[in-house]
Amino acid sequence: MDMLEIIKRRASCRGYQAEAIPDDVLERCLEAARWAPSACNQQPWRFIAVKDRELRERICGECFLPGVPMPWAKQAPVIIVLCSKKSMVTHFLAPLLSGINYHLLDLGIAGEHLVLEAQEQGLGSCWIGWIRPKKIKKLLGLPFDMTPVSLITLGYPLEPGQAGKRLGLDEIARVDRWD
Ligand SMILES: Cc1cc2nc3c(=O)[nH]c(=O)nc-3n(C[C@H](O)[C@H](O)[C@H](O)COP(=O)(O)O)c2cc1C
């Protein structure tokens, strides 16, 4: 399928079938993320694919922030925990000069590679950023230098999705100057 068509068809999926994701399909999604670009090629991402039902239920029950109920998340047969693993120069020193958190850019790119491959494979996905990183870290026994920054639910969708509305190109892009 045409790349732009895949991009446009992706929509946050908030209802999943119970059907498991075959290992080779999951691996393709992770492989797509592996090929993402990153500042200084530091590849500051680590992925944990949580398949275990009890762990998924504990993530959904204990590790979301309050105020935004997400009951659909525990239907997803896989929850990807997207973690950062920062390096000294690129992720601590360089941001002091530029003010840019490169590792978060890199993780966003990698996560979206994963999500777009998931779309290509017929899976639905949803980013979940409304999380308690410290609780997830403890629950999954992550080492001190790995920090969860987002979750991505994955599974076969209950129904076809419809992406949220977008600003028009004329509102978000200009040529040469912003005026
Ligand atoms: C970094 C990030 C965090 C998000 N966190 C949540 C979340 O906690 N809960 C949720 O239901 N959706 C979450 N979303 C999904 C957005 O609400 C969704 O992408 C946006 O409304 C556009 O809709 P669409 O993805 O269907 O096009 C998140 C998306 C991103 C990129």
Image (cartoon, rainbow, N blue to C red):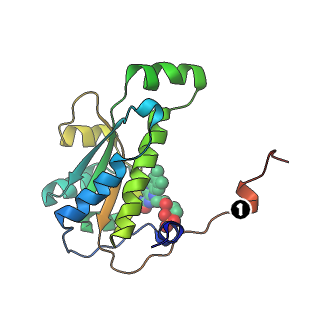
Residue drawn 41% across and 43% down?
107
Type of amino acid at the residue the image marks with label 1: Leu
Nearer-the-camera pick, 63 or 167: 167
Residue drawn 58% across and 20% down?
97
x then y, percent, for residue 41: 41, 33
**Residue 75 located left or right of residue 39:** left
**Residue 117 located left or right of residue 165:** left
**Residue 102 located left or right of residue 117:** right
Residue drawn 85% across and 48% down?
179
* Whether residue 67 can be seen here: no
- Locate residue 44: give its quadrant: top left
x then y, percent, for residue 119: 39, 68
The relative height of residue 19 versus residue 128 in the rendered view (above or below) is below
x then y, percent, for residue 9: 48, 72
Residue farthest along the bottom direction in this orientation: 159
User: On the image, numbered disc 1 is attached to which residue?
Assistant: 169
x then y, percent, for residue 150: 37, 47
The relative height of residue 117 versus residue 18 in the rendered view (above or below) is above
Circle 1 — which element? Answer: helix
